[in-house]
Amino acid sequence: MNLAFCIPFAGLLLCIAVLPLVKAEWWEAHQPHAVVFWSLLFVLPFAFVYGPGQAFEKVLECIVDDYLTFIILLFGLFCVSGNITLEGDLAGSPRINVGLLLIGTMLSSWIGTTGASMLMVRPIIKMNAWRKRRSHIMVFFIFLISNIGGCLTPIGDPPLLMGFMRGVPFFWSLHLLPVLLFNVVILLTVFYFLDRRAYRKDIAEGLKPDISKPGTEVHILGLHNLIFLAMIVAAVILSGTLPGMAAFQDAEGAVRGIHLFGEVTLTYPALIEVVIILAAAFLSFKTTNAEIRRKNHFTWGAIHEVAVLFVGIFITMQPALMILKANGASLGLNKPFEMFWATGCLSSFLDNTPTYLVFLTTAGALGFTEGMPTILGTVPVAMLEAISCGAVFMGANTYIGNAPNFMVKSISDENGIRMPSFFGYLLWSVTFLIPVFLLDMLVFFL
């Protein structure tokens, strides 16, 4: 696989980063055209070199194995969370915001980073609607709730689910609790002082929260939708456990499913996951008053934008993943801190799930005899911790590093919050996240 095949992926990322700054209206109207252009710029040369059948199989495999479950999960959580709203007299203040970010971070490991993000994003936006300076709130929201908080269980983030499917015990990730607490304390402390300064400036300009009566009366509307949220979490758990059951395997041990083309199969566990999630979304809409969605300012714009852009990202990043998979074992990485940075840096721009699998496979092939036994080989605990943290934590470095990042940005934009540009957000992550990750390396992975 020639590196030239990675040009469309780089081109699409450059469009996402630059065009909203220089041609915002044009970009908003022509995102699908840009996705088609860069996707074809990869597919057509690939078909010329490797044959049309191989090209079609590669794109179909990407859509069926990766994109389908990704976008269905995002769609289901988007729909269900849009039918839950928080009302009351809580106004966005530094202490309230720290509390909400902490709650969301703790939720991320148990309902997933995407689930916690979609559940918490609208209440936090609503409580801070009176404020002028609030983009930093959503940036730290992405840091903590959409990424770092998902490290404690396989439900939290897809890379850990892949580890669970390959022999890592379900509750092993609780080993990462000290690293999580270390990062959360640092980031929430920094956030508090940033938010306090912004809060005081807003108050000094005469901005006041719209609170009709004193007190902190809070109530949740659409609470029954937590049942449908639980359905989605159950679907994700099933997608990780059913493939290992004999009933879902053929005589050769392959997962059963509907054969589509070449070696591409829509597996029955994936199909069950999709059906359960879509059923949860449908029932959520049928059983919830539309007034709740109106109070949430619910629109389809955010999920539409994510669906369009990420199908192009998933297709065009295939060459980069293929090169990484072919050469991962020859990179000479055999220390935890090396695995931490290698997994993390690539997870910032590529899908963190296959990146995690590449380096987990690499670690399992290094011939260690002590550590965590997996079906890929024995992996030292410190190295497994480093790979897991790198994949989960550093997805926060860019908007495309993890599924909910771009969704939170889109919802924030829709609600009048001026979020940083692609490069602007990258500057935030370099300023606040990279120093924390350097501390992680020094304290936990050296």
Image: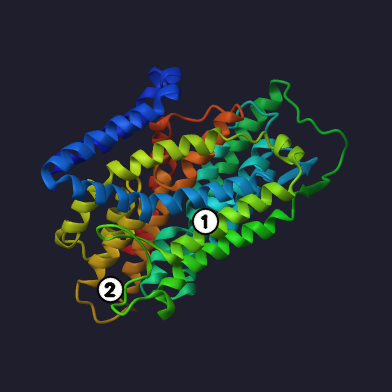
Mark 1, mark 2: which one is toward the viewer?
2
- 392 sits left or right of 51 in the view: right
The residue lying at 43 percent from left, 66 percent from top is 268
* Distance of label 1 from label 2 (alpha carbons): 26 Å
Relative image position of residue 32 (x, y in whole percent)? 39, 30
Residue 156 horizontal/vertical position (percent): 50, 60
Mark 1: few, some, or many residues within 10 Å (few <14, many ≥20)?
Answer: many
- Which residue was labeled with disc 1? 149
**Residue type pointed to by label 1:** Gly
Residue 117 visible to an observer of this rendering: no
Residue in the foreground of this view, choosing between 346 and 294: 294
- The residue at the far right in this view is 213
Q: Is residue 167 left or right of residue 5?
A: right
Tell me: residue 332, above or below residue 402: below
| Residue at position x 46%, y 38% in the image | 306
Task: Give amino acid for label 2.
Answer: Leu
Depth check: 243 or 117 in front? 243
- Left or right for 213, reference 193: right
114 versus 259 height, above or below: above
Comparing 296 with 126, the one in front is 296
Residue 69 location, quadrant: bottom left
**Residue closer to the observer: 425 or 17:** 17
* Colouring style: rainbow
Provide the residue designation for mark 2.
376
> Callout 2: few (<14), some (14-19), or many (20+) C-alpha neighbours within 10 Å?
some
